[in-house]
Structures are given as C-alpha cells and as structure tokens.
Amino acid sequence: MSLKLENVTTTVGGETHIDNISLELSPGTLHVLIGPTLAGKTSLMRLMAGLDKPSTGRVLVDGEDVTGVSVRLRSVAMVYQQFINYPSFTVYDNIASSLRLTRLSNHEIDLKVREVAITMRIDPLLDRRPAELSGGQQQRTAIARALVKDARLLLLDEPLANLDYKLREELRVELQELFKRRETIVVYATTEPSEALMLGGAAVVLDEGRKLQSGPTLEVFQNPASVAVANIFSDPPMNMIDGEIVDGEARLGEDIRLPLDGHLGQLSPGPYRFGVRAGHLSVVSSPGHEFRFGATVDFAEVSGSETFIHIRHGGAAWVVQEQGVHSFDLDQPIDVFLDAARLFVFADSGRLVAAPAPAGGGTPR
Amino acid sequence: MPVLVIVALSTIIPLMMVVNTSVQDIFGPGNRVFVGTEWFEEVLSDRRLHDALRRQLTFSGLVLLIEIPLGVAIALAMPKRGWGVSVSLVVLALPLVIPWNVIGTIWILFTRPDIGLLGVLVNGLGIQFDHTAAPLDAWVTVMLMEVWHWTPLVALLAYAGLRAIPDAYYQAARIDGASAWAVFRHIQLPKMRGVLMIAVLLRFMDSFLIYAEPFVLTGGGPGDSTTFLSTYLVKLAVGQSAPGPAAAFSLIYFLIVLGICLVFYRALQNVGTGDKR
Amino acid sequence: MALIELKEVAHAYVARPGGPEDYALKRLDMVWQDGAAYALLGPSGCGKTTTLNIISGLIRPSEGRVLIDHRDVTALAPRDRNVAQVFQFPVIYDTMTVFDNLAFPLRNRKVDRNEIRSRVHEVAEMLELTADLKRRASGLTADVKQKISLGRGLVRKDVAAILFDEPLTVIDPHLKWLLRRKLKQIHQQFSTTLIYVTHDQNEALTFADQVVIMDEGEVLQTGSPRELFENPRHIFVGYFIGSPGMNLMPCRIDGNAAIVEGAPIALGEGIAERGRAAGGELVLGIRPEFLRLKPSAEQGNVPVSVLLAENLGDFKIVTVSLGKLTLKVKVPEDQEVPGEWAYLNFPPEWTKVYADGRLVE
C-alpha cells in the first residue's frame, strides 16, 4: 500500500495545525516524524489514519482518494505514548480484540495472538490485566495489539516516551527488528534526534505544522536544509555563530578567521550564519582540528565516557563534546580547536548553503 | 435517517402543534379562529405570570446559592480512598434515585406538625410551623426539599472534579507551606471550574423547570406563594382550559430556557479552551 | 545549606510488612553533604522517589530517622523542613501571575512585602523570567513552567536542599540543554545541596558530582560519574550506565585468562586468581566504548563476525557476534568498519570480571 498526502492543511478554530504538507510514503518503509512538541506530528498522523479530515488537500491510498473515509474502513493500527489497553480485558483479550471483529475462526485468532505475544515477549503474561503489568509490559501489549492487525499502515506516536531510559533502549532494538520484517508502512514520531538516527529509514522534520525537510534520515542529519532543521535535529544543539565572508576569508564572530578552502570555496561574500556540531570541536589539537580560538569555560558536565564543556566565546554560548573525562575550573580560559571542514554555512534567511562532506564509511541504515 | 424520523415525531410535530394552538382561538372542535399574536400579548401582560416569573427567579437563585457551595463542601469532606468512598457515594446517590413525586410526598409527611419528624420537632421548639398555612413556611419546606434532593448531584460532580487533580499539586502545596484555605482557593477551585459550570447549568435549568415536587408538596399554595412558572403553565392549560394562552406561554418559556442554555454553553466553551497545555 | 542524613531508614507502603519484598526501600544509611549535587539513578520502582519524598517530608518512613544539620526532623511536616521540591509535571498555580507564583511560598510564611519583591526579582532574573513576571502562569510553555516551579524553591532564603523528581521529563531535548545549564549555574551561585532523581543516565551523569545507583529498594553503588562508568562494582551498574550498556559474557577462568565462547582473553594483574577464589557464576564485562575493533589478527585479538554497523551521526555502533554471544562496539564517526569479519581487542585495564554479580578486584 502506498500513502500520499497532497497539500493537506488542517485549521482548527483559527489555528493552523498542519500547513500545506505533501508527503509520499511507500510500502515497507519506516518514516520518522521528528520535531518538537506541538510541531504537528500527532495531527499529521491522525490525518494519515483517517481520524481527522484535512481542511484542504487530499489523502490518497494506492492512488485512490480516501479523504474523509472513516478510519474504520482503512487498514490502520496506532500505538500511543500513554499505554492504551482495555483495562478490563486480559492481555490475551486485548490482543485478540481487533481480530474478533474479523471473520477469523477462534483457532486462527488463537494462533495469531500467541505468535505476536511471543514476538513481543509477553506470552507468560497473557492471563493478566493491564493494571497488573509494569509500564514496559503494558506498552508491549499495546504494540502487540497493533501488530496483530497486520495493518498496512502502522503509526507509533512517541511510543517509548513514557518508559525508562534503559527500557526505551531495549524496546527500540526490538522495534527495529519488527519493522524490518513487514510490508507495512511504519510511521514513528519522536522528539529525540538520537532515536531518529537509531531507527534510520526516512525522516520528515516538522515544526509549527510545516514540513521543513524530508529524506533519508542520515542525509537529513548530515545536510540540514536550514537553521531550524539543524536545531531540531541535533543533540546537543548545534553551535551557531554569525559571521561573514569577505576579502577571501570566512570571519566567524570577532576573531575566528578561516581561509575559504574545501566546501567553503564556492561561497560568495556576504553575511552568513556558521554552525558546527559539538562533537566537531575539541580542546585538544589534532590533525584536522587546527584552527584555534580562545574561549572561557562556564562549566563541564561529565557523562561517563565523555565530557560536555560549556564555553563562552564572544557573546555565544557553545558546547564542546569531548571524548574522555576532562575537568575544568569555572571561568578558566581555554583553547578550542575547530575543524573548518566540518562547518555548516547558512544564509541570512536560514537556508543551508554549504555542508561538510559526510564522514567516511559505515552503512547508513 | 431513522434518527430524523424519531426526532421529527417526538419533537418537531408536537412543537408545530403548540405553535398552531398558540395563534388560534379554539371554541370547540372544528371551530377555530386565527387570532395571531393575541394570546402572546395577553400572556405577556398577565400580572399573575409576572408574579410566577419573579418567584421562579428567586427560587432558582436561592437554589444555586445554597446548593453549589454546599455540594462543594460535601465533596471536599468525602474520603479519597478506602471503603468510605463507596459508602459515601451510595449514600449521596440515594436522594437522586427517588421518583420526584414520591419526594414531594415524603416531605409532606416529614413536615406535618402532627406526625412528621421535622414538623413535630420544630413545633416542639416553640416555632409555629405549618407549610400548608404560612407562605414562608411553605417556601422553607420547598427549599429544604429541593436542596436535600439535588445537592448530592452537585457534590458528585464536584467530587469527580476533585479526584481529577494530580497528587503533585497537593504535594507542591505542602512544600510551599500553603494553608488549607490557600490550597482550596488556588488549586482545587480553579481546577474544578469546568465541572462547576456544568453543575450550575444543570441546576439552573432543572430548577427553572421544576414541577413535580413542589406541586405534590404544596399544590402551588398556600394561595399562590409557591406557584412557579411550570405550575402556573399547567394551571393555565388544564385548570382554566385555556390552551391558546398556555401554548403561547410554553413557547415563551421554551425560548427563555433555550437562551439561558446558549449563554452557559458559550461560557463552558471558554472554560474548556483555557487549559490546552 | 545543611547536612542531611538518613539513619537506618526503610519504608514499606503496606501497613504491616511481611518480608523484604514488602519494602519499597530497604534499610539504608546515607549522608548528603552540604552543597553537593547528587543524582539518584535507577529504573522505575527502585525506590528513588520514595527516598526523595522521605527527605522532603512528604512521606514519613516506616523505620529510621531523618536528620538535617543533626536535628531530628522525622516528625516534621514538609513546610517546616526548609526543603524545596520540583516535580515531574510543572506545578503552577493557574490563577496567579508568574510573580505571585514565585511569591507564594514567601507569602505563606508571612515574609515582609518588600523582601518578597526583592527576592522574587532576584530569582526571576536568575531564571530569565523577568519579562514574564506580570503574565498569567497558565498560558506559558512547559519549560517556563518548570522554571517557575524551580523558582518557588529558590525564593526561600533558608532552603537547605532542593529536590528534583524527574523534572525534565516533559521538556523537549533542545530545551533540556538550556535548563540543565541553568541548574548548573544555580548550583554554582547558591551552593545549595541538590538531589536529582531520574531514570535517565544522561541527566544523572551530567548533573551530579555523586551518583547513587538504586535498584529494587537498595543502593548498589555511589560514586562520581567517572567511577561508575570506568569501574562499576555491580553487574547492574555496568548494564544500567552507558548507552548501550556494558557487554556481559559468561566465562570461566583458565590459567591467567578468561575463556569466553572458547576464546582466551587476557586479564589484568591478579584478577584471574581472585576470580577463581571468589567462585560462583563468572561474567566478563567490558564497555562498548573500550572494546577495540581491529581489521587484523594481532596477538590476543578475538575473531568475530560483523552483523551490523549503525551510523548514529557522531559515532557508530557495530554489532558483532562471538559464538552465541552478541556484542556491541562503539567506534568513532570516521572509522572504517570491516565488512564481514573483524577482530576484537580487549584492553585488560578495562576488562572486568564479576563473580555472582560483584566486581572482582
């Protein structure tokens, strides 16, 4: 099944929730909707499912116009952030509930329920009620309920957000396995860049109801089309500084001057915004990280294997992500090293004009 | 389609008949004269109607003034967990499930000066109390009956509203050192706003339309003192056999209630959109 | 600013606890140093929120005593304890302005009007809320509301400790960074004791000087983020900290090496004998950050087959299989990953042995 959204807009009571979005989803693919809260991820998924009708625009399934067709007639399954299960049913009945509305025999239903329960590792819990389960188990039940339908469209709205960090990690790996094996279109909403990167597939970046960029997830990450996308799709946030290209060099802020080599070469003079990821700055000089500038340390956060050093340079507050553990004193002046080949350059309007070449090797998922 | 048919039969057609009657003078079967707005004019200038309206508004006003705060107070006092919850819910619900004319009857008996518990008690204290004789006594009795009957509804709604408040608010208030009154004013009352609006709307409408209980209790008397709007309407239509004016009046009545409902509906909508995040 | 002590504290939510399984918090003794930043880290149900609520007074422990500056406060109500708490969901008083919200705790304690005004302005400036002071609190975004919740804790001059119960849960990732920065600045400026409960290790490790790891009502290890990362004393700590967590492999000891799936792995000085002496179930642990992926079979490298390489932007995670086991290796962004076969190097200083769950040292 292929799903297409054509110029859909949703306005509710004067507020635009979805602003002219067009999207094409092909079968057997995973699409990640990434954006901050209230960006329109849930609204968009509701449009895809048929729970809401767009104010303008069309929704097409396999080329046929289904705008306005009730969700009951479409092949959709949805998993929510809050673990939604029928509280009075056992886990078994919860999973079987949607199958009972079809023409399958009890025996066939039993087979399917048990199969999915084993996949989601809840087969020992089939007799319990949701209130007796932990958060992770409840969400597995909700996912099992969605999977057993074998719907052609599977929507997951931040399904792991209410779970513990470690549990999230584990479930994410399981979900990745699950998604690989099906012909379904899977749409997964999240606010976290690391989750999007782990899931792979194709990313759609949303903000304030508008689609900012779409494409293979890793590509969008490495080539954010605008400052807005760069801000949404990076963790820690991308370090930004205003500057200009003049007299054959790039001037970042007050005192960083770089020659126009590599990908900076074809840029015309004028004002720009420069961005660099926290991981591409260093407090240690190394090949590639040659351009040095002075900054003052605000504080350092040690996170086990790496340190986040919060610095001040000119008026900008930046973060340097450094491997290993380093400690610094408050207001200590340090040298920070920058690899010019990793700079992102954005025009005044916010649009990307130059991006670093992607780092070598490894299969993007 | 079936819904349309049912609505038509149960609402539209009778409504049309009422409109029909309101603009005609009926002398006998087959003998009708179109009189236009004559009945409306007569009704609107009827002094007894104005009295009934005044009484009605006073009544509804008093009802709201007493029942809403009382209901909230009861809800605040109810236990939050344990077996006490089910017990108090059942006890509260009891007055609500008794048929309304039975309620009237209960209170007649209850307040009789000779055999009623309340009647004997009050008279024993030296206060002359007879709801069939004195208008004030009748009013007090009707009010007591109404409050006893319907405050549980407000209490139940308020209780539901209170239960929906997450624990973290109370915990934060304890840490902030807030007194019980501050907790009520700044946390409980604002969070119950939606529920209270519904309670006010329901109670106002119901009390404005009230018929069975006061009719059974006092028959509208002594004299006219407890004749509220609906009682007067029935007297017109049935007692005086004046279908024309009665029809006209009931249309006006209907429009008043409709108007008030719209006002409350708007108010509710605004309350609802207040809390998005 | 004060020293907080928990002496022999235990808590059961049921009225008459039967055995250890009824206890949400098993007996513990803890000392919270004045002015330090602590994190209580653990999965749901481990007892961290219970511990926090016992310190603030929202819960009275079934057993044990709570002391603040050597004074027994176990029977004192929260309002008398000079402790502030910030909750998971922003708790603000909807009907009041931001100013009134911040002033609330002071008004309840009958503080002088002028002092209220100066404190509120001071705190508002610290939290960058000055522009919003006149606005109604109900219309603002979640991160601003959390700042207000935090502000209510900071306005009280005498606050001994500020407790946080998963406060960044509803905040977007981008804003989380800004709020964390704010928390650090507050810590530096006020040097109040801060205790932060979370299940998110990133928050815990970046925030705290000392992290307390809990599981099932018990404290498993207390230490700096670095200690917990480099030297986890318990298998649970190895698994829980680190994303992904420590690679854990059942093994046996033979001579001076550990044998995993038939492959010998060299161990640090003396570890082998102590491991043998300790007995019990032996598990080898090494973090994905410390495993080295090599293209060739140099001395001591273990051959593995490469299952998957995921590019996660700033780094890559390579999943390999060694016999029946699946291991993960974290490699830098630019490193080339071999196609099908590779060799793993286990640096002995980072290779840990656990006997019955506990570190062999």
Image: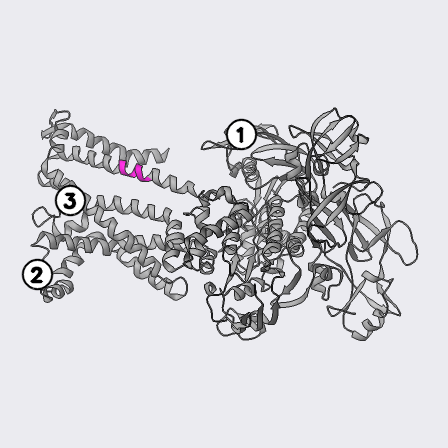
Coordinates of residue A2 in the picture (x, y in percent): 63, 33
Residue type for callout 1 = Thr
What label sits on residue A9 in the rendered view?
A: 1
Vertical position of residue B256 compared to residue C54: above or below: above
Chain letter, disc 3 residue: B
Residue type for callout 3 = Arg
Would residue A160 be visible to someone looking at this image? no
Q: Mark 3 sits on what residue?
A: B55
Q: Mark 2 sits on what residue?
A: B128
Residues at marks 3 and 1, CA–CA distance in whole angstroms: 53 Å
Chain letter, disc 1 residue: A
Coordinates of residue B121 in the picture (x, y in percent): 13, 66
Q: Earlier in the sequence, mark 2 or mark 3?
A: 3
Residues at marks 2 and 1, CA–CA distance in whole angstroms: 72 Å
Badges 2 and 1, same chain: no
- Front-lying residue, C175 or B78: C175
Question: Which residues are the magenta region?
Answer: B259-264
- Front-lying residue, C111 or C98: C111
Badges 2 and 3, same chain: yes
Mark 1, secondary structure of its residue: strand
Residues at marks 2 and 3, CA–CA distance in whole angstroms: 24 Å
